[in-house]
Amino acid sequence: MADRRRDTGRRSRQSQRGRGRRRYTPRRKRCGLCIDGVDVVDYKRVDFLRSFLTPHGKIRPPHKTGTCAKHQRRLAVAIKRARYLALLPYTAEHIRRHQ
């Protein structure tokens, strides 16, 4: 028993590297509007629409927000209507001031 070497676990770690190791796969984002059952995206809900805009005033892409194609189209139309009626800005205020 005195001749036994202490196993450092090095061999077992090396043999496990190639097999059985899972790669990170991010979960697909679910559309929050589908989950909430929203059918109509209203252009008058400015606070709700602002959550889909970047700080510079651009519309966030669906892979960032997790919205489905149907709701992304409806959001874009609602944001554009709100911009037209001056409820939302076309650009960020700090960008307009420095030009």
Image (tube, rainbow, N blue to C red):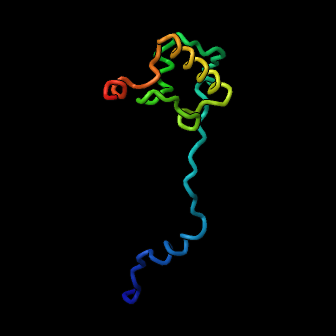
Q: Position of residue 73 (x, y in %)?
A: 64, 25
Q: Position of residue 12 (x, y in %)?
A: 50, 74
Q: Where is residue 81 in the image (x, y as percent from the top left)?
A: 57, 15
Q: Where is residue 56 in the image (x, y as percent from the top left)?
A: 42, 30
How many marks the image carries: the answer is 0
Q: Which residue lies furthest to the right in this view?
A: 70
Which quadrant would residue 1 be assigned to in this image?
bottom left
Instruction: Say whether residue 83 is left or right of residue 55.
Output: right
Which quadrant would residue 57 be assigned to in this image?
top left
Q: In this view, does 14 lie above or below 72?
A: below
Task: Name the image quarter holding the C terminus.
Answer: top left
Which quadrant would residue 68 be assigned to in this image?
top right
Image point (47%, 12%), residue name = 87
Image point (41%, 86%), residue name = 4
Between 52 and 27, the one lying in front of the other is: 52
Between 95 and 7, the one lying in front of the other is: 95
Image point (39%, 80%), residue name = 6
Image point (58%, 34%), residue name = 62
